[in-house]
Amino acid sequence: MDLNKILKGHALDVLKTLPECSINTCVTSPPYWNLRDYKTNPVLWNDGWTGELGAEPDFNLYINHLCDIFDEVKRVLKDDGTCFVNMGDTYGGSSLNCSYAVKTKGKTSFLKDVDHLQKVGHARGKYDKSLLLIPFRFAIEMQNRGWTVRNVIIWHKPNAVPASVKDRFTCDFEYVFFFSKNKKYYFEQQFEPFNPLTYKRKFDDMTETKAKYFQGLGKRKQFLFHQKLLNNELKGRNMRAVWHIGVGSSSKCGHIATYPEKLIEVPIKAGCPENGVVLDPFIGSGTTAAVAEKLNRKWLGIELNPEYIKFAEERLNHE
Ligand SMILES: C[S@@+](CC[C@H](N)C(=O)[O-])C[C@H]1O[C@@H](n2cnc3c(N)ncnc32)[C@H](O)[C@@H]1O
């Protein structure tokens, strides 16, 4: 398999051409439902619907399309493979992009009739002003299709754009879902500094005396911990699941929805050994590839919009 390149096409079709059990980890951010137009050509889905991913008339259809793609991701992942998916939520009723499906003579067409939509609860009415909880619906469907959900990571954005809303709180975070293909998987533990308050207390608490105390009690684990603390040998504590990472400016890299390099450094380090392969089926401006290269990992990208591919290739050559 040729690596360190972007394959042009619809993720579902391209993934089907890749060999099974060949990728270490997948790190990606798909188009969100009903949010942006990436100007990609309409594609044909397993259920017969044709259109862009994210432009489905109903979010359940979107989740099925997305999970059909991740079924293929699962197939190409090694048995100890993992998958990290960044996704944000959407409010219902903010746009009336919803329609309903009618099947006539085996052909499905989509109609917009607000009264009918209210009855079936897909437009203004049932979901108006409500968070649609799409990331969680997606994660539950992934679980139904056999993935193990290991973490819901909160990506807190300290510099999130202020919102003009006054009747709810401003949303300043997105999610990164961490899935594994099987119960046993490759994972390099990640550390963060100890909480300075507890750390200081542990020191002020006469570490040496405490080590001796635990030794006296035969508590080997605690004894070793205090010894290591004393000798500055500890890497820190196990990394927590709320990550504070600022959003960068998308305009600089010619793509409307890039994620920051910092967001995916930890997933790549944790999920892929050096010289292993990172996959991004929605690679956009090539952020995943840029970070994988910096961290000495191989990568494989898929992208449907040729403009973005050109852009990502220029970025990667430049870097
Ligand atoms: C949220 S963006 C990813 C941005 C990327 N993480 C970055 O930092 O640049 C989603 C990308 O998926 C691409 N895309 C949309 N539908 C696709 C499909 N069916 N197959 C492959 N790529 C698709 C879009 O063109 C867009 O570049």
Image (cartoon, grey):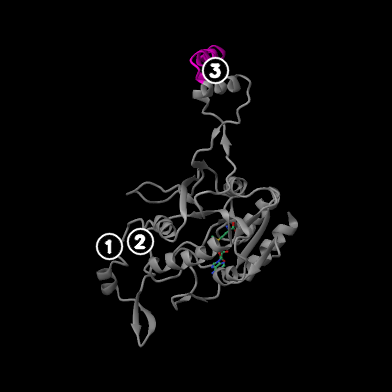
Q: Position of residue 225 (x, y in %)?
A: 55, 23
Q: Is residue 287 left or right of residue 173?
A: right
Question: What label does residue 92 carry, if any?
Answer: 2
Task: Please tell me which residue is depicted at 51% across the width and 53% down the height of the picture.
Answer: 182
Within 10 Å of disc 3 (Cα), the crowding (few <14, some 14-19, many 20+) is some
Q: Check mark 2 vs ligand 1: CB closer than 8 Å? yes or no.
A: no
Q: Which numbered disc, 3 or 1, marks the residue that appears first in the sequence? A: 1
Q: Position of residue 97 (x, y in %)?
A: 39, 70
Q: Is residue 212 magenta?
A: yes
What residue sits right under mark 3 in the picture?
Answer: 203
The amino acid marked with disc number 1 is Lys
What residue sits right under mark 1 in the picture?
Answer: 126
Q: Position of residue 269 (x, y in %)?
A: 62, 46
Q: Are marks 1 and 2 in contact (CB under 8 Å)?
A: yes
Q: Check mark 1 vs ligand 1: CB closer than 8 Å? yes or no.
A: no
Q: Residue furthest front?
A: 218
- Mark 1 residue element: loop
Which quarter is ligand 1 in?
bottom right
Q: Position of residue 174 (x, y in %)?
A: 47, 50
The amino acid marked with disc number 2 is Gly
- Mark 3 residue element: helix
